[in-house]
């Protein structure tokens, strides 16, 4: 679900989970395109490091919002 959420919102998704052996969702860094930049599937503690290019972020979803229903302040 995180991959589709990143692509849908055109935002980076950073998902951190515990290192329990029975975890169902890995720790992930996902680009706005939906590309998985890092994924840790391990019962052990681990760290990832990534540089995020914020120029990849798009406002196309927010720009389509109905301003008569909700408003954003930037």
Image (spheres, rainbow, N blue to C red):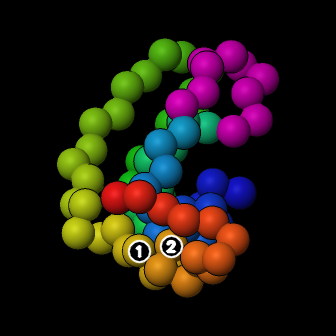
Horizontal arrangement in the rendering, residue 12 relative to residue 52 (left or right): right
Q: Which quadrant is the N terminus positioned in?
A: bottom right
Q: Residue 12: percent from the left, percent from the top?
A: 43, 56
Q: Residue at x 55, y 83 (%)?
A: 64
Q: Residue at x 54, y 39 (%)?
A: 15
Of 34 and 59, the residue lying toward us:
59
Q: Is residue 22 visible?
A: yes
Quadrant location, the C terminus: bottom left
User: Are there few (<14), some (14-19), or many (20+) residues within 10 Å of tag 1?
Assistant: few
Q: Which mark is residue 26?
A: none
Is residue 49 rendered to the left or right of residue 68? left
- Number of the label disc, if any, that sits on residue 59: 1
What label does residue 62 carry, if any?
2
Say whether residue 27 is magenta. Answer: no
Magenta span covers which residues?
A: 16-25
Please report contact status of discs 1 and 2: CB closer than 8 Å, yes or no.
yes
Q: Check disc 2: other Cα within 10 Å, few if <14, some if 14-19, many if 20+.
A: few
Pick whichever, 55 or 70, lies toward us.
Answer: 70
Image quadrant where residue 8 sits? bottom right
Left or right, residue 68 beside residue 24:
left
How far apart are the two marked residues, 1 and 2, measured between alpha carbons?
5 Å
Q: Position of residue 60 (x, y in %)?
A: 46, 81
């Amino acid at each position: 679900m995180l991959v589709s959420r990143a692509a849908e919102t055109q935002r980076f998704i950073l998902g951190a989970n515990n290192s329990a052996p029975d975890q169902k969702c890995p720790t992930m860094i996902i680009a706005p395109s939906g590309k998985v930049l890092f994924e840790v599937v391990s019962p052990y503690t681990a760290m990832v490091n990534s540089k995020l290019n914020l120029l990849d972020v798009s406002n196309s979803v927010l720009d389509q919002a109905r301003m008569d229903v909700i408003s954003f302040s930037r």
